[in-house]
């Protein structure tokens, strides 16, 4: 068998609508070639994100009926708190409506203007929330992460020498915490090894700097540790997770990923003073500490999901399905980031479309073509998402990786639908030279990828660079 088959059967189905290429072409024009602006019911296979798109289990749906919607002290909160404590083992558990609120609460409490927060690679909301405090968000991932051909098993690892350089350059007193994103979403969903994790901890101990995890995909990271790191083959995912988190002081979590829910998140930590300050802010902006912006039923679904995600049959299928898509593409010669990550396959747009310069957003052009021809929606992770304008000239400074991420929702698509995605991309690769770049006609001052607008260029038309 080339992939582990589904460890579940389908009980409820949601019909999906087929659209014509002409309809999709019109929708693209109306959306300014921004796939975030396409109505979801006009997408056949939606790989925009794995966040909040999971199918819940029958046990989770049953859990919704156990929702206790009391303002204070809901029984679901205690179940949720006990579950989080048993996996993450930090003293305090603060629910939030999703991951970025956990980030916002943490950073608005502990990060001050002029400070510096290193991470392997900051996710876009993490970076934006740090920069919003007037601080600098710095990436310190190992160099292999930037080479799509490098098959190292732990390309999410922190570059420890670089991390130390950043700390010394900023001054340890200006580094309130260091983050490790597991798995490293913006670097291809690549895992961090236990060894690198404990060495990061040891380094930070020397400077007295706390270590926090951006733990959205912690179970997938633990599965890779079990598969790839010596000494972990016979350990359960729960045990690996407990060991991993024992090296940290806390975490932010978007449960929309490895919490297997459609909404929810939390912050969990040990520090008493930080917890008091964060809780006060939580009450101001989210809600009382035993619901934090969620309904009781959401907390129950999250508590159940956090247990289900530790199941090895589930994880073997989950990581196996993503790898299946990657292998089909790789075997057909389509350039993808290797090795395949835990939640997504990343198309290398620079290699896929070498005739489109980075100023003309090749990854966005690729994502647009995938939708137009096959009804498949991915997301650009490249110059649109991470490109910066040089102050003064307005010139775009490009990120090193220019990719289209095909994020696979958890327990949602069958392997046949995944095979359709692979076949479509192989077909597009065969006629890649016909694709043209784009020019950006609108951008917001932050997180511009969500609302940017574009126009299509035709062959031979140079990009007009918009200067903001
Ligand atoms: C690594 C990482 N951190 C943080 C977040 C933010 O989580 P949320 O979308 O729940 O706010 C995401 C979401 O995709 C993520 O992938």
Image: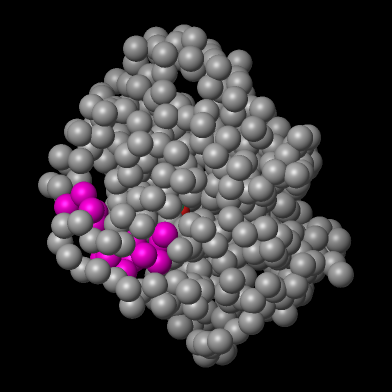
Along the line of sight, the residue nearer the viewer: 421 or 236 = 236
Residue 138: x %, y % from top left? 46, 28
Say whether residue 339 is left or right of residue 97: right
Say whether residue 208 is left or right of residue 411: left
Please state the extent of the stretch shown in magenta in the rendering. Answer: 288-303
Identify the residue at horizontal 23%, vertical 37% (top origin).
278
Kindly tell me whether residue 111 is visible in this rendering.
yes
Say whether residue 72 is left or right of residue 274: left
Q: How many marks?
A: 0
Q: Quadrant of the N terminus?
A: bottom right
Q: Quadrant of the C terminus?
A: top left
Q: Is residue 80 magenta?
A: no
Along the line of sight, the residue nearer the viewer: 404 or 350 = 404
Residue 413: x %, y % from top left? 62, 76
Q: Is residue 299 magenta?
A: yes
Say whether residue 22 is left or right of residue 445: right
Along the line of sight, the residue nearer the viewer: 326 or 199 = 199
Residue 317: x %, y % from top left? 70, 65
**Residue 364 lies in what quarter of the image?**
bottom right
Kindly tell me whether residue 189 is visible in this rendering.
no
Residue 354: x %, y % from top left? 71, 51
Q: Is residue 429 above or below residue 402?
A: below
**Residue 8 lies in what quarter of the image?**
bottom right
Identify the residue at horizontal 59%, vertical 29% (top origin).
197
Identify the residue at horizontal 54%, vertical 15% (top origin).
203
Residue extending furthest left? 284
């Amino acid at each position: 068998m080339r992939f582990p088959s589904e460890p579940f059967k389908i009980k409820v189905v949601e019909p999906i609508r087929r659209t014509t290429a002409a309809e999709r072409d019109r929708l693209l024009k109306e959306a300014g070639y921004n796939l975030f602006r396409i109505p979801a019911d006009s997408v056949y296979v939606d790989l925009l994100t794995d966040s909040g798109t999971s199918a819940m289990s029958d046990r989770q749906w049953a859990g919704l009926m156990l929702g206790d919607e009391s303002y204070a002290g809901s029984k679901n909160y205690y179940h949720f708190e006990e579950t989080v404590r048993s996996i993450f083992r930090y003293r305090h558990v603060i629910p939030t409506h999703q991951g970025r609120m956990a980030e916002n609460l943490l950073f608005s409490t502990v990060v001050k203007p002029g400070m510096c927060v290193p991470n392997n690679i900051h996710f876009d909301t993490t970076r934006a929330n740090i920069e919003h405090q007037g601080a600098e968000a710095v990436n310190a991932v190992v160099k292999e992460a930037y080479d799509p051909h490098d098959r190292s098993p732990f390309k999410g690892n922190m570059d420890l020498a670089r991390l130390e350089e950043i700390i010394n350059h900023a001054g340890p007193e200006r580094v309130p915490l260091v983050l490790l994103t597991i798995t490293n979403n913006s670097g291809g969903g690549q895992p961090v090894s236990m060894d690198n994790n404990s060495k990061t901890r040891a380094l930070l101990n020397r400077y007295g700097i706390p270590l926090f995890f951006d733990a959205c995909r912690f179970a997938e990271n633990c599965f890779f540790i079990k598969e790839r790191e010596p000494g972990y083959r016979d350990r359960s995912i729960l045990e690996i997770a407990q060991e991993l988190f024992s090296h940290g002081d806390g975490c932010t979590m978007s449960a929309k990923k490895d919490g297997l829910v459609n909404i929810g998140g939390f912050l969990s930590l040990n520090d008493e003073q930080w917890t008091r300050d964060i809780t006060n802010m939580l009450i101001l902006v989210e809600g009382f500490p035993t619901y934090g912006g969620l309904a009781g039923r959401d907390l129950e679904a999250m508590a159940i999901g956090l247990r289900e995600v530790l199941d090895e049959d589930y994880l073997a299928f989950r990581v196996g399905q993503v790898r299946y898509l990657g292998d089909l593409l790789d075997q057909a010669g389509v350039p993808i980031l290797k090795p395949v990550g835990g939640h997504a396959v990343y198309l290398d747009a620079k290699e896929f479309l070498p005739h489109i310069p980075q100023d003309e957003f090749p990854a966005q052009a690729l994502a647009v073509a995938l939708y137009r021809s096959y009804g498949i929606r991915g997301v650009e992770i490249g110059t649109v998402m991470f490109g910066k304008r040089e102050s003064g000239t307005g010139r775009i400074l490009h990120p090193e990786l220019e990719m289209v991420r095909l994020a696979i929702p958890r327990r949602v698509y069958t392997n046949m639908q995944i095979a359709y995605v692979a076949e479509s991309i192989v077909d597009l690769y065969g006629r890649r030279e016909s694709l043209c770049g784009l020019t950006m006609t609108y951008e917001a001052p932050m997180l511009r990828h969500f609302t940017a607008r574009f126009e299509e260029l035709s062959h031979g038309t140079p990009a007009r660079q918009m200067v903001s």
